[in-house]
Image (spheres, rainbow, N blue to C red):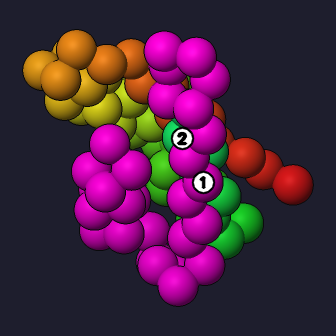
Amino acid sequence: MQAVAETILKALVSNPEALVITRSDEGDRTRILVQVDPSDVGKVIGKQGRTIQAIRTVLKAAAAKRQEQVTLDLVTD
């Protein structure tokens, strides 16, 4: 799932070298934490959160095929 998220996000952001994706397994759920350049945060979130929600939907559909659960969180520091 991390590779799927990375492929989508690299195509979306202006600074792909600043993209940091961290994966952590929490029981039966995989959590993917995404950190992007501050100038790309708006692109990842999209209008009213539509872009990030679409990415989450794609990841959940891919995970469902493998009978897994995944969550995607955007980290803004």
In this figure, which residue is indicated by the disc labeled 1?
22
Q: Are marks 1 and 2 in contact (CB under 8 Å)?
A: yes
The x and y percentages for residue 52 are: 45, 36
Lower position in the chain sequence, tag 1 or tag 2: 1
Tell me: 6 left or right of 19. left
Is 29 a magenta residue? Answer: yes
Tell me: 39 left or right of 56. right
Figure quadrant of the C terminus: bottom right
Separation (CA) of disc 1 from disc 2? 6 Å
Is 37 a magenta residue? Answer: no
The x and y percentages for residue 70 are: 43, 24
Q: Which residues are magenta?
A: 1-30
Q: What is the quadrant of residue 21 in the picture?
A: bottom right
Figure quadrant of the N terminus: top left
Question: What element does badge 1 sit on?
Answer: strand
The x and y percentages for residue 50 are: 41, 29
Q: Amino acid at mark 1?
A: Thr
Q: Residue furthest right?
A: 77
Q: 48 or 52, which is in the foreground?
A: 52
Q: Can see residue 47?
A: no
Q: Which mark is residue 32?
A: 2
Q: 11 or 64, which is in the foreground?
A: 64
